[in-house]
Amino acid sequence: MGVNLPDWLVPLRDIAQVGGPVVVLLMVVAVLTGAVVLYKIWQFSKAGVGRHKALSAAVAAWDRGDRAQARASLAQSTSYLAPVIKMALSCEKAAAERLSAEAELRFARLERGFRYLDSVAQLAPLLGLFGTVLGMIAAFQSLQSAGTQVDPSVLAGGIWVALLTTAAGLVVAMPTALVLSWLESRMEAERVIADKAILTVLAPTVRSNEAKVTVVADHG
């Protein structure tokens, strides 16, 4: 007794039947990859990646010497970097490495899953090529079994079925590589923002000006 599939699943079933176990495996990998990508997008959104307006305002206020405004703006920030900057407000310049380590800890959480996406982007084409090789072997075995009664359509049919796995591997790999590149670019931008914020808080412009005034007064 057959199972009635939704209309949109019928083409996928046909492709899986034609392509064999390699295509089925690539379909499973595609579903898992899609789930990971959706999770990363949700995680980035929840963490406030790219949304540092209040945090930037706090850093700018601290840089110009408005400590009260800086703390008020930071309290309004929903950025995952807010706790790190809050620590920086009460730290000395020598604590820069520790603050950077705290930021890296948060970056590591956001970058979980990147290794899986990178593996899929690299291995999916190879897996598709492996399926193509297996398909070509099967096609030529069929050609050998036919002996003198060679039917070119049999060989052609075997070749296109074999190439189907390569196409499936590329369909999985290319979007994965594109999404991974976008996620990594976002994290690079986050690191720049974090480094700038930490260094600005630890060495604000106003403090430097005050130091200059003190030196001038001493020499006067």
Image (cartoon, rainbow, N blue to C red):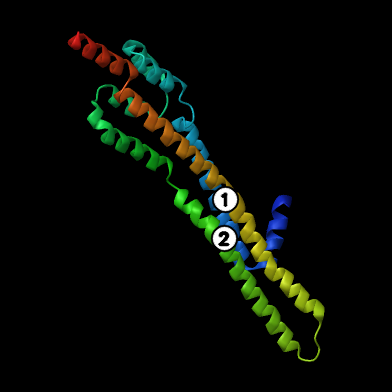
Residue 18 appears in which quarter of the rendering? bottom right
Question: Of the residues under marks 2 and 1, which one precedes in the sequence?
Answer: 2
Q: Position of residue 201 (x, y in %)?
A: 32, 23
Vertical arrangement, residue 79 with respect to residue 162, above or below: above
In this view, which residue lies farthest toward the left?
218
Residue picked out by circle 2: 124
Q: Residue 38 location in percent, x, y? A: 54, 42
Please, what is the three-letter code of the amino acid marked with disc 2?
Ala
Q: CA distance from mark 2 to mark 1?
A: 10 Å
Q: Residue furthest bottom?
A: 148
Q: Answer whether residue 157 is visible to the viewer in this image.
A: yes
Choose top left, top right, bottom left or bottom right for residue 136.
Answer: bottom right
- Say which quadrant the C terminus sits in: top left
The kind of residue on which mark 1 rests is: Thr
Above or below for 134 versus 104: below
Mark 2–mark 1 CB contact (< 8 Å): yes
Q: Nearer the viewer, residue 150 or 95?
A: 95
Residue tagged 1: 176
Query: Is disc 1 placed on a helix, strand or loop?
Result: helix
**Residue 219, percent from left and from top:** 19, 11
Residue 86 visible to the viewer: no
